[in-house]
Amino acid sequence: MRIGRSIVAALSSIAIMASMGACGSANADEGTLTFLGNNNQNAYQGLLDGFEKKYPDVKVKFSTVTGAQSGYQETLQTRISGGKLPDVYILPPEQLSDVVKSNLAKDLSDESFMKDIGQTSRDMYSQGGKVYGMSVSGWVRALCFNKDLLAKAGYDNIPATWDEFKEMCKKLKAAGVTPYLEASDTIGVPIPAWIAQASAENVKNGKKTIDQAIADGDTTFEKAYTPYYAKWDELFKEGILNSDVSGLSAESVVSEFTSGRLAIMPSGSWDIPTLSKTGINFEYGTIPMLKKGDTPYAEGSPDPAYAINAKLSGKKLENAEKFLAYVASPEGLKAIQDGLGLATATESYSAKVDPTFQNVYDTYIKTGHFYMQFLAEGAMRPEGYTQMQQLALGSITPEQAGKNMDEKYATLR
C-alpha cells in the first residue's frame, strides 16, 4: 500500500525455484547461492540475471512465499526458530533482534560494500554497535498537492513552516477548496517529522533522541510528545480539519484528490502510477516544519535489508558477499528500482525518479532524513494513531493523549 509497502505488496504465487528445505544447508553445493526474497521472482529477475552474468560460476536459487508481507515474516520466523536460513535473505527490521540472538546474521559493519550505505539505514539494522543488514532503499510519506488548486490561493508549493502551511490552508478553504485531509490509519502525519527533527538536534548536541529518552525512562510521552500533539491539534482548533478524518480511509482521501476536490494529501511514490492516469496536475512537497530553518524530515523508513547467514564459510560466504556487493552496485540498484519499484539510494548513487517526486527524493531519501517512531515497539505506532483519532474527535486533549501513550507503554515494559 505504500512504497516500501510496494515491498509489502502482495507476493506472487509463481513457482518457487528451490524448496525452502534446500535453503537451509549452509555450505552444500558451493556453486549455488540460495536467496529468500519477499517479492515474486519476476520482481527480482533483473537483479538475479545481472549477478549471474557478472559471476557465471555462481547460480542463484531463488525462493519466496505467497501471500502478504506478514506471510513472509511468519515464514522467516519459522526458519529462524529452526535455525535454518538460506545463504542470503531479506531481513525486516522487526526481526533483527531474533536473527542476531540466534546468530543467523553476519556482521556486515566493515564490509567494503557497506561504505556507501547511509547512516540512517545502518542505524536501522544495528545492534550492539554492529550492522547486520544492508538496506539500499527507503520510503517516505510526504505531501502531494494539486498544483492548479494551490494556484487559486496564490501558491506554487507547500510552505516550509507550519504557520505558513495553516495560512495557506485557510486561503484554500476561503477559495472553496478542501485544503487538506489525512487518513485515519496514518493520522498525525507531521508529528514524526517534528520529532525526528528535534531528535536530530538532540543528537547533534550530545543528547538522546526523544524516543530513546522515553525508552530509557528519562522522560515520558506526556512531557515529550504533548507539545507536538498540541501543534497538530491546531488544524482542528483553527477549522482546517474536522472530526471526520478520524474515520477517513486512505482510499477515500485519494478519491477526493483524484476527483480534483482536494488540494493536499499525505502520500508517497506508491500513488504516482494512479495519479498519473488522472490528468491531475500534481507534485510532491515536503512536510512543513515548526519553525524557519528546521532541517526537513518526514515519516519513513529504510526498507527491509539484505542479510547474510552467519553460518556460512568458505566459498559459500564469498559468493554471498559478492551478491551483496552486486546489490549495492549501480547496476544492482537500478535492477532493484526497475524490478521492485523501490526508491534506491546510497551515498554515491541517485535513482532516476518521477519528476513529481524528485524534490522529496532529494530532500529525504537521498539524505536519510526520514524517521519511523518506535519501530522496535510494534504496539506503540497503532496506539499513537488511536490517540490521534481520539484527539481529532475532540474526546481527549493533547495532554491526555500523552498520558494514554505512557499508560500503554507501561504495559509493554
Image (spheres, helix red, strand yellow):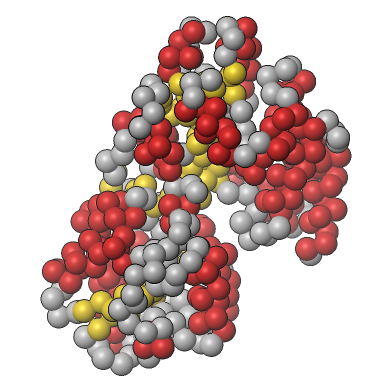
Residue 384 in the image: state x and y as whole percent.
72, 46
Residue 208 visible in the current orientation: no
Residue 74 in the image: state x and y as whole percent.
55, 73
Quarter of the picture containing the C terminus is bottom right
Residue 210 visible in the current orientation: yes
Residue 407 in the image: state x and y as whole percent.
85, 53
Where 395 falls versus 375 (above or below)?
above
Left or right side of 168 for 156: left
Where 289 falls versus 31 (above or below)?
above
Q: Quadrant of residue 365?
A: top left
Residue 227 in the image: state x and y as whole percent.
75, 32
Q: How many marks?
A: 0
Q: Residue at x 31, y 92 (%)?
A: 28
Q: Residue at x 15, y 80 (%)?
A: 57
Q: Residue at x 52, y 33 (%)?
A: 254
- Please name whichever residue, 292 or 202, is drawn nearer the observer in this view of the structure: 292
Q: Quadrant of residue 308?
A: bottom left
- Please name whichever residue, 10 or 112, is drawn nearer the observer in this view of the structure: 10
Where 96 falls versus 222 (above or below)?
below
- Please name whichever residue, 380 or 148, is drawn nearer the observer in this view of the structure: 148
Left or right side of 185 for 326: left
Where 182 falls versus 109 (above or below)?
above
